[in-house]
Image (tube, rainbow, N blue to C red):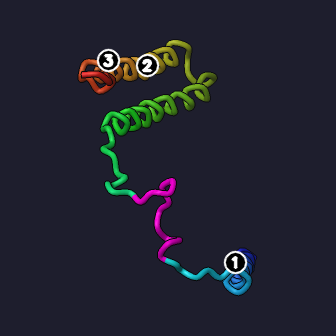
Amino acid sequence: MLLIMMMFILLVSLILLFLNLFIGKKEFIDRSKMSSFECGFSPLVSSRLPFSIHFYLIGILFLIFDMEVVFLFPILILVGKLMFYEWIYLSLVIFLVLFFGLEYEKKEGSLKWIF
């Protein structure tokens, strides 16, 4: 049954793909249409600007701390299975890891924007 459903989905996908090729709008590639339009003037310099590494670092730090917060969700499930002191101890350990990680990032200067 699963194999039949997979084959049906594959067949419908291929039909839609080929239908798009036949019915879809035919475009002729023109050099002026493929170039970027910059308010009526042609660019003389590269449009690439230097990207501040701080944005990248803040994004990585957000992902790290976000994943650590996700580790708190299973603790909520364990509330009924663990004793109260075990639950408090486990929560405290995770919060301490978060706190010391944040303090380390502050001390390192990763969260500082102005040098």
Dot 2, how many residues are within 10 Å of its Cα: few (below 14), some (14-19), or many (20+)? some
Which residue is rendered at x = 72% and y = 76% of the image? 9
Residue 63, image x, y percentages? 43, 37
Which residue is rendered at x = 38% and y = 32% of the image? 58
Residue 57, image x, y percentages? 34, 35
For residue 51, side relative to residue 32 (left or right): left
Residue 23, image x, y percentages? 74, 83
Q: Check disc 3 and give the amino acid type.
A: Glu
Which residues, given as a range, are shown in magenta? 31-42
52, 88: nearer the viewer = 52
Dot 3, how many residues are within 10 Å of its Cα: few (below 14), some (14-19), or many (20+)? few
Q: Which residue is mark 3?
A: 103
Name the chief secondary structure element in magenta: loop
Picture quarter with the N terminus? bottom right
Q: Quadrant of residue 99?
A: top left
Which residue is rendered at x = 37% and y = 36% of the image? 55
Q: Are marks 2 and 1 in contact (CB under 8 Å)?
A: no
**Which structural element holds mark 1?**
helix
Q: Which residue is mark 1?
A: 13
Q: Quadrant of residue 75?
A: top right
6, 107: nearer the viewer = 107
Q: Which is closer to the viewer, label 2 or label 3?
A: 3
Q: Are marks 3 and 1 in contact (CB under 8 Å)?
A: no
Q: Is residue 49 visible?
A: yes
Q: Which residue is mark 2?
A: 95
Residue 44, image x, y percentages? 33, 57
Dot 1, how many residues are within 10 Å of its Cα: few (below 14), some (14-19), or many (20+)? few
